[in-house]
Image (cartoon, rainbow, N blue to C red):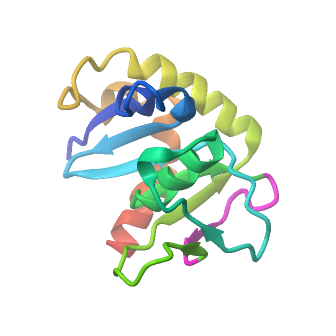
């Protein structure tokens, strides 16, 4: 089965005044519509509950942008050398409200691997002018991104729906 893929740098999706805060955050959309967001380190300590900003439109730091990206994504890839090779449900997010929210699945990889992927994602994102532009995953089969998606993310999609 051919899997269409799109890569978007999130600075393109944010309002101009907060776009720089989203630098380094990429969303990879697989079809059927499933997105995997690649988020640079947001420095969560073991056991720490993350409290999200009350107003997503008034964020002031890259960490807040990263936390929002994690919280609002179904699947996330992020660097954490201590947790590399593991995955978890992000039950540590505190939305500070009573509305039910979905819980993201977080895949941890090493910092060096993430840095290599970030460079690759930046290059790939330049090939997608529109949010609906896609290429088959097979056409980027030799990339680190394709290897990670096939080895870790796609099996988790099957397992966790």
Question: In the image shown, does 94 or 31 lie closer to the viewer?
Answer: 94
Q: Is residue 144 magenta?
A: no
Image position, residue 37 (x, y; %): 46, 47
- Residue found 20% across the figure and 47% down from its top: 1
Query: How far from the left and from the top, in percent, is residue 127?
Result: 33, 15
Answer with left or right where residue 65 lies relative to residue 55.
right
Q: Is residue 83 magenta?
A: yes
Residue 20, placed above or below residue 33: above
Residue at (44% x, 58% y) in the render: 75
Please indicate whether residue 101 sits to the left or right of residue 53 in the image. left
- Foreground pick, 36 / 155: 36
Q: Quadrant of residue 30?
A: top left
Quadrant of the rendered structure where residue 136 is? top left
Principal SS element in the magenta part? loop
The stretch in magenta equals 81-91
Residue at 40% in and 22% down: 125
Looking at the image, residue 160 sits to the left or right of residue 128; the answer is right
Q: Looking at the image, is 11 positioned above or below residue 44?
A: above
Number of marks? 0
Where is residue 142 shown, x and y percent of the image?
Answer: 48, 27
Q: Quadrant of residue 111?
A: top right
Q: Quadrant of the C terminus?
A: bottom left
Residue that lies at the very extreme toward the bottom in this rendered image: 98
The answer to whether 91 is drawn above or below residue 119 in the figure is below
């Amino acid at each position: 089965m051919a899997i269409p893929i799109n890569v978007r740098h999130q600075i393109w999706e944010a309002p101009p005044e907060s776009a720089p805060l989203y630098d380094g955050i990429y969303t990879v959309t697989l079809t059927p519509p499933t997105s995997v967001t690649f988020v640079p380190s947001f420095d969560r300590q073991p056991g720490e509950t993350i409290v999200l900003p009350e107003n997503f439109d008034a964020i002031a730091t890259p960490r807040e942008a990263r936390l929002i990206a994690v919280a609002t994504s179904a699947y996330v890839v992020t660097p954490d050398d201590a947790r590399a090779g593991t995955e978890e449900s992000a039950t540590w997010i505190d939305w500070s409200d009573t509305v039910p929210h979905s819980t993201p699945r977080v895949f941890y990889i090493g910092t060096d691997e993430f840095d290599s992927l970030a460079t690759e994602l930046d290059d790939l994102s330049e090939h997608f002018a529109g949010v609906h532009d896609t290429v088959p995953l097979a056409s980027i089969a030799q990339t680190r991104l394709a290897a990670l998606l096939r080895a870790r993310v796609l099996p988790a999609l099957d397992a966790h729906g």
